[in-house]
Every structure is written in structure tokens, then in C-alpha cells.
Amino acid sequence: MANEQDFLDKKIQEVASSSALNKYYIFANDLINNLLDKKKRASHDTECVFGCIYGATLSGCVQKKLAIPNVSCGYLVFLHHLKKKDLIGRNTDLLQQKHKNILEWIEQCIEKMKKQGTHTIVRRHSESSLRIKWKGVEYHIVIACTFSKRQYCEFHYTQQNVHVYPFSSEQLQMAANDLIDEAPIHQRYIKQMSRANKAWTKFLEKNMSASLSLLRVYYMREELVGKNTRSAIMFLKMWQHYQVKDKKHLSNNSLEIICVHLFDQLKNKSQPNLTIFSFDIIEEFFKFVAQFKKPISEVLSVEWPYQDKYLLHSEDVKNFKRTLNPGSI
């Protein structure tokens, strides 16, 4: 199994190299610089809705280093500071409208830049998010409020014109400590609003998810979940993309949580110091998924998620299938 693990790790490294992931940061900073320039120009004439934004973070699978280049979407969160006293009663409606206005302003800026020749596409726009393709890289853009100004997320924090960046272990630990302290504040307001208005509650839950998204990065780091678990996650993300991309499938966060859970289960069942390989987790994943399917009357073949790099010939696959019993994976 060790040889298979090495092979998988090598293939994943080829696909998700550091240089490939770095493009997400480069183009996100390019987008932010363009928006800041637009804000500066707009401020000469009138107050710009983007003026309240103090910083941003590129979170999600890119920050987790679990992104598949040309497939995964960068999760770009723009942040503004909100005083606790301002989040009362119907102010939540005003806050929702504020987020909506900022997203609309961003979309308008992108459309203008598109007309000026910038290679960009607006994929989808909802009240709470904007999905774009900026110079070939896809981003999911959201707005979130924070109850303190996070210095490590402020514009130009590391250097001029660099706003989002890959966090080091120390920086991620610092951010996690900060966000763990802030999480109860979000939860308290959600609990208060749940008695008043379901729409407000849903909005605040989405805001908390975006605002604290770096915590999900912290809890998916290699030293906590293991390298092999992360490799299993990457394999399954690629498998989902190539095999079920046009069908309903698990979100990235759900897939990651399931894999970590399966790893913990295997670890608890196994002997101490026994290595849990990626393909152990992958096998358990498909067993888990099969529980929610109709009874399988024939062999379920799980294809390798590389369409252009076949590892086996078709005849090899047929021969292997003949060795399996009905219902096998």
C-alpha cells in the first residue's frame, strides 16, 4: 500500500503544485488592486460603498492547499468592521442591503473592466455572493463583517499591493486564536435573531461562515488531520469533478469533514502506530456513500480521476471486475 500512497502523492503534487496555487493569490491581488483603484477614483465624486471594506482574505480550499487548479474556486472574502451596538433590530436589514450594494458595486466594476479589455466573466450573482472568472481564475466573492479589525487581513498588510497571501503556520495559529474568541459573539447574535426573524438568522449564519472561514483552514491543516487524509480528499475532489460534476454532489467542506471522520474511525479501530493510507479512507468513503444508494446488483467501478492519464488498459479493468462479487466496490 505504501507504493500506491507514494504514487498518489506524486500525482497530486503534479496537479496541485505550489506555482499553480500561487496563481490564485496573484490574480486575486490584481483584482483587489483594480477595485481599490476604482474606489479611489469614485471617492472623488461621491462616497463609495466599497469604502467601508478594510481588508480581504483568500480562504477556502486555496488557503487549505486542497485546491485543484482550473477546477477549484478561490473563496475571496471582503471584510468590514461592525460595532456590536450597530447589530440590533432592523439594522440587520440595513446590513444585508449594505452587503448587497457592495457586491453590486464590485460586479459593476468588473463589467466596466471587461468592456475595457480585461479578460473576465461574471458567472453568477446572488444577493449574498458573486462568482467570477478573473483572467482565467475562478473566484467566489462574499462580503462579511467582523467585530474587530483584523490587522493580518488589512489591505497592504504584508507589502504594498499585496492583500491576500498564504498563511504560515504561525500566522494561521494567530488568526485561529482571534477567530475562536470572536465566534461566540456571532453565535450570540444569531441566537438572539432566531427569535425575531428567520431571514436575519440565515443572513447572520452565512456571515459567520464567511467571517470565520479561516477556522476551517486551521482545522484542516496537515499536522491535525494527516497528509494521507488530505491526499484522499484531493483524490475524491478530482473524482467528483470528472465523474459527477453535472450531478448533485458533496460540497468541498462536506467531503473534507467526511474524510476526516472516516480517518478518525479507521484510526480508532486499528492497532496503535498502524498507518492509515489514503486508499483506506477512499475505500471507506465509497462504502459510506453506497449506504445511501439503492441496492447494488452489479459491480460499481470507480474510475481514476484523470481522463487523459489512464493507469490501466480497459482489458485490465474487465479482468479485475470478473474477480469481484456483485455489490463490490
Image (cartoon, rainbow, N blue to C red):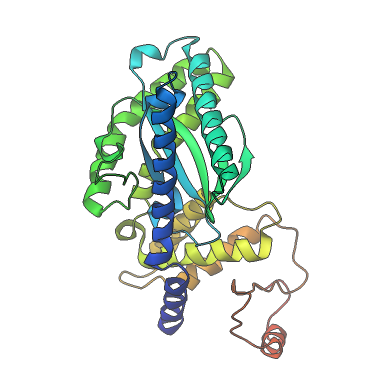
Locate residue 180: give its quadrant. top left
For the question of whether residue 269 can be seen, the reply is no
Which quarter shows the N terminus? bottom left
In the picture shown, does residue 253 fall above or below 70? above
How many numbered circles does the render carry? 0
| Residue 224 % position (x, y) | 32, 56
Is 304 displayed left or right of 212 in the figure? right
Q: Is residue 180 above or below residue 58?
A: above
| Foreground residue among 318 and 151 | 151
Q: Could you tell me which residue is drawn at 58 percent across and 21 percent down?
A: 199
Q: Residue at x 50, y 62 (%)?
A: 68
Residue furthest to the top: 89
Q: Position of residue 159 (x, y in %)?
A: 24, 46
Of 92 and 40, which appears nearest the observer? 40
Report x, y in % for residue 239.
Answer: 59, 66
Q: Quadrant of the C terminus?
A: bottom right
- Between residue 37 and residue 101, name the one nearer to us: 37
- At x 70% / y 83%, what residue is drawn? 321
- Residue lying at 51% horizontally and 47% vertically, measured from the top left: 139
In the image, residue 48 lies at what x, y percent? 44, 23
Residue 134 appearing in the image: yes
Is residue 237 shown left or right of residue 33?
right
Residue at the right extreme of this rendering: 297
| Nearer to the camera, 150 or 25 | 25
Quarter of the image for residue 275 reads bottom left
